[in-house]
Amino acid sequence: MSGPMNLQNAAVQELRRALSFAAVGQTSLEGTSQRIVELIYTALSGEQSGSSQLALARCFITRPFSALAAIPDLQGTAQALLGGDIPDPTHRCLLLMATRGVEPEWNTRISSAGHKAIPLGSQLLMERTPMITELMRQLGIPREYFLNRGLLPPLSVPVRSAGCFYIPSALGSPYIPAQDSFVVPYGVRSVLGLGSTLGARDIFAVLLFFRVELSPEVAQLLSQLTVSIKIGLSTLVHRLFQ
């Protein structure tokens, strides 16, 4: 695909309203997250089937290690990435909550090979998800907190200061890994990250990988989605997975 992405303000405002009510009818944070990425993917994919303007859309949140108790394989994954050590119950882990993309296996978090549960206090997080690490830094979470056993400070990011991380050219960017296996073969041209706080000590991040050029103007327009995503995710936070 080629050429810049065209987007009207009216379409963004309609998407914002839908995202704010993403929790309606859902019974878990996973369900709400999947609804959010589905809404974004559908709205931004373009009209022609098979020629999606988005290669991949994903939603991540942080949660304490103790929250994974009901899903032993996730706890085991996080523990293995820490060298087998049993982390403190409050140790924050980055969880893949929802995914939607052009490949069938990109449409369920269960099939993810390496992003289902990554402890914040590991160098591996910074290596596998450098874009999320940078987005969190822009939200005011210094690098040292990622390497300090995942113990995040109390977070207080004003709603209007919600983060937007924009990469106009993905090819060759140090923030986008898997250049040969993802960026090049799937024609990823621009990337946008949207994130903010979720409660007192957690954050969320939605990553959008575009197969078209994303201009600064369109990126700024899409940054308005962050607050609506935050509202949708904040509505239903007690049950993590379906």
Image: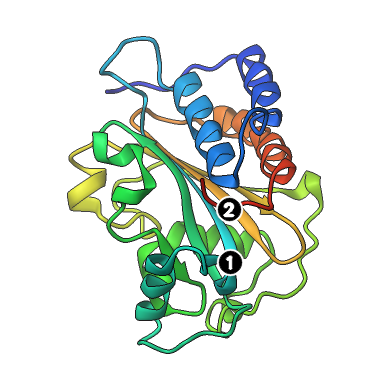
Q: How is the image coloured?
A: rainbow
Q: Amino acid at mark 1?
A: Ala
The alpha-carbon separation of the residues under discs 2 and 1 comes to 8 Å
**Percent x, y of residue 7:** 54, 17
Q: Residue at x 75, y 58 (%)?
A: 199
- Residue 87 lies, with reference to residue 95, above or below; the image says below
Q: Which quadrant does the N terminus fall into?
A: top left
Residue 46 visible (yes or no) = yes
Tell me if 221 is positioned left or right of 123 in this view: right
Q: Residue at x 77, y 57 (%)?
A: 157
Q: Which numbered disc flags the more N-terminal residue, 2 or 1?
A: 1
Give yes or no for contact between labels 2 and 1 (Cβ–Cβ under 8 Å): yes
Q: Residue at x 69, y 37 (%)?
A: 232
Q: Residue at x 62, y 21 (%)?
A: 15
**Percent x, y of residue 105:** 26, 40
Disc 1 residue crowd, few under 14, some 14–19, many 20+, Cα 10 Å: some
Tell me if 97 is positioned left or right of 100 in this view: right
**Percent x, y of residue 29:** 60, 46
- Residue 103 lies, with reference to residue 171, above or below; the image says above
**Percent x, y of residue 174:** 36, 60
- Indicate which disc residue 100 carries: none
- Indicate which disc residue 67 carries: 1
Q: Which residue is mark 2?
A: 240
- Residue 119 lies, with reference to residue 199, above or below; the image says below
Secondary element at tag 1: helix
Secondary element at tag 2: loop
